[in-house]
Image (tube, grey):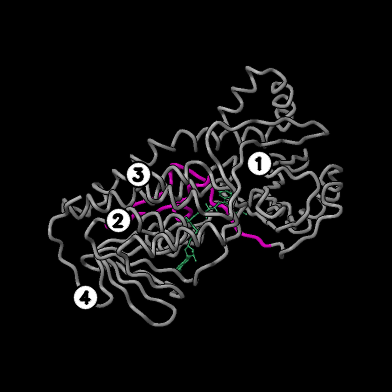
């Protein structure tokens, strides 16, 4: 794309700053690579960095990446530390059902996958990158923002993409975001080696009627390892004073199939926790001169917990909106709202449906029995799979 000559400033002044180099931030930087804008990508971590996650990489994530350039698809195809997952098996009350997935999906430890995206960004995006650079505050100025960091640096920009995750400083300070415990999940995960009967192409989910609609996941990873995790609505955690780490081990101990399969497995990492801001369509995700993406915009699927796909899609759409803003020299909230419209036209109804499905299942756990019964019928099984 040919861009009009754009005024840029020198030093630590930019046209656009992206806060956070996770999937949303890297995707935005990659989508801006030919914009001609002076872009800066800032992350508090140094890479490779880990992120507590289930490590399931949804098809939407790779589709968004491939849509930018065929070379990115070629690079992903030769990226080794991943498995291709084709099936999900659900286990409940000694019954199992499984669904075959039509589209591509993968698992890859986030330390590897995020580093893959980060290196791609270093190579292809004409972006200045600052790591080990913790943004502590954002200040509105006449024609943009000024960002302050822990180490006393100041960065200024005309436009800002907030991609700094679930605890986003940008979302808190510009969109006055707080945690909505009724739409937020607290989760823990650990890595295990040598789980019995692990199929490298199947992600597994275990339910227990005491914790519905929560579940434990076992997602296979390369080298006969797996990511094992459990999450619960934050409101329930607080109200019932749940110790999530304790429940994690109790869940394994009290689920005969899991206990049996993990009997000779080794836990190879600490059990670590992190929050999931579930997707909603009524939160502020943009305003004058700024856009929020990924977890900073609360875009995680309320049923599957997948957030990487929506993070990458939103990163791409935010970058495209930013380009339109510079082309039209219009940074108004009204103009930027086009981003909200385009994003929610893609994922809004899915987020809403899954939000209500989660609430219904929480209120009527017996529905899961019905799902397992219905899955015996091939036609109904197809419908369930479509709904998921
Ligand atoms: C336990 C758990 C399991 C999950 N399982 C899955 C799954 O299996 N599949 C799936 O698709 N999704 C899953 N998710 C959700 C997924 O992890 C997120 O949706 C995804 O990481 C969002 O990407 P992001 O780029 O928005 O944020 P992040 O990946 O969190 O990246 C944000 C980046 O911003 C940086 N940053 C943060 N604050 C600052 C600051 N102040 N200054 C500078 N930099 C900053 C961070 O260092 C980080 O690199 C899971 C989440 C959890 C917690």
Mark 4 vs 2, N-terminal side: 4
In the rendering, which numbered label is found on residue 32? 2
Q: Residues within 10 Å of mark 1 (few under 14, many from 20)?
A: some
SS assignment at label 1: loop
Q: Tell me the CA gap for discs 4 and 2.
A: 19 Å
Magenta segment = 272-300
Q: Quadrant of the C terminus?
A: top right
Question: Would you say the residues marked 3 and 1 are in contact, meaning their CB atoms lie under 8 Å apart?
Answer: no
Q: Is residue 84 left or right of residue 149?
A: right
Question: Would you say the residues marked 3 and 2 are in contact, meaning their CB atoms lie under 8 Å apart?
Answer: no
Q: Give the residue displayed 18% in from the left and 68% down from the top.
A: 8
The residue lying toward the viewer, choosing from 359 and 14, is 14
Q: Position of residue 223 (x, y in %)?
A: 69, 55
Q: Give the residue displayed 68% in from the left and 53% down from the top.
A: 227
Question: Would you say the residues marked 4 and 2 are in contact, meaning their CB atoms lie under 8 Å apart?
Answer: no
Mark 3 vs 4, N-terminal side: 4
SS assignment at label 2: loop
Q: Is residue 179 left or right of residue 126?
A: right
Circle 3 is placed at which residue position?
A: 340
Q: Between tags 1 and 4, which lies in front?
A: 1
Q: Position of residue 121 (x, y in %)?
A: 39, 61
Q: Between tags 3 and 1, which lies in front?
A: 1
Mark 3 vs 1, N-terminal side: 1
Q: Residues within 10 Å of mark 2 (few under 14, many from 20)?
A: many
The residue lying toward the viewer, choosing from 76 and 314, is 76
Q: Give the residue displayed 82% in from the left and 34% down from the top.
A: 93
Circle 1 is placed at which residue position?
A: 201
In the rendering, which numbered label is found on residue 10? 4
Q: Tell me the CA gap for discs 1 and 4.
A: 50 Å
């Amino acid at each position: 794309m040919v861009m009009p000559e754009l005024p840029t400033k020198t030093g630590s002044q930019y046209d656009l700053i992206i806060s956070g180099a996770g999937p949303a931030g890297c995707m935005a930087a990659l989508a801006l690579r030919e914009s001609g804008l002076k872009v800066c990508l800032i992350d508090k971590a140094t890479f490779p960095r880990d992120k507590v996650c289930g490590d399931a990489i949804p098809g939407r994530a790779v589709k968004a990446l491939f849509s930018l350039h065929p070379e990115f698809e070629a690079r992903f195809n030769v990226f080794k530390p991943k498995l291709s997952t084709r099936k999900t098996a659900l286990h409940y009350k000694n019954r199992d059902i499984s669904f075959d997935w039509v589209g591509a999906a993968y698992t890859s430890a986030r330390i590897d996958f995020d580093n893959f995206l980060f290196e791609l960004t270093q190579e292809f995006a004409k972006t200045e990158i600052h790591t080990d650079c913790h943004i502590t505050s954002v200040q509105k100025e006449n024609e943009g923002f000024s960002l302050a960091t822990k180490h006393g640096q100041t960065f200024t920009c005309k436009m800002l993409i907030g991609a700094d995750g679930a605890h986003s400083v940008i979302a808190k300070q510009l969109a006055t975001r707080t945690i909505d415990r009724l739409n937020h999940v607290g989760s823990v995960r650990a890595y295990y080696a040598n789980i019995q009967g692990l199929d490298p192409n199947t992600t597994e989910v275990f339910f227990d009627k005491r914790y519905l609609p929560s579940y434990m996941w076992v997602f296979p990873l390369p080298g006969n390892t797996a990511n094992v995790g459990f999450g619960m609505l934050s409101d329930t955690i607080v109200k019932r004073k749940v110790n999530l780490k304790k429940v994690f081990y109790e869940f394994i101990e009290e689920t005969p199939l899991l206990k049996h399969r993990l009997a000779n497995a080794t836990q190879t990492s600490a059990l670590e926790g992190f929050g999931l801001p579930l997707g909603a369509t009524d939160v502020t995700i943009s305003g004058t001169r700024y856009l929020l993406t990924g977890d900073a915009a609360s875009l995680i699927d309320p049923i599957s917990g997948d957030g990487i796909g929506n993070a990458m899609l939103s990163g791409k759409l935010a970058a495209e909106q930013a380009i339109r803003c510079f082309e039209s020299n219009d940074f108004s909230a009204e103009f930027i709202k086009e981003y909200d419209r385009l994003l929610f036209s893609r994922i809004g109804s899915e987020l809403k449906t899954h939000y209500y499905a989660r609430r219904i299942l929480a209120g009527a756990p017996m529905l899961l029995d019905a799902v397992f019964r219905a899955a015996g019928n091939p036609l109904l099984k197809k419908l369930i799979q479509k709904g998921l």
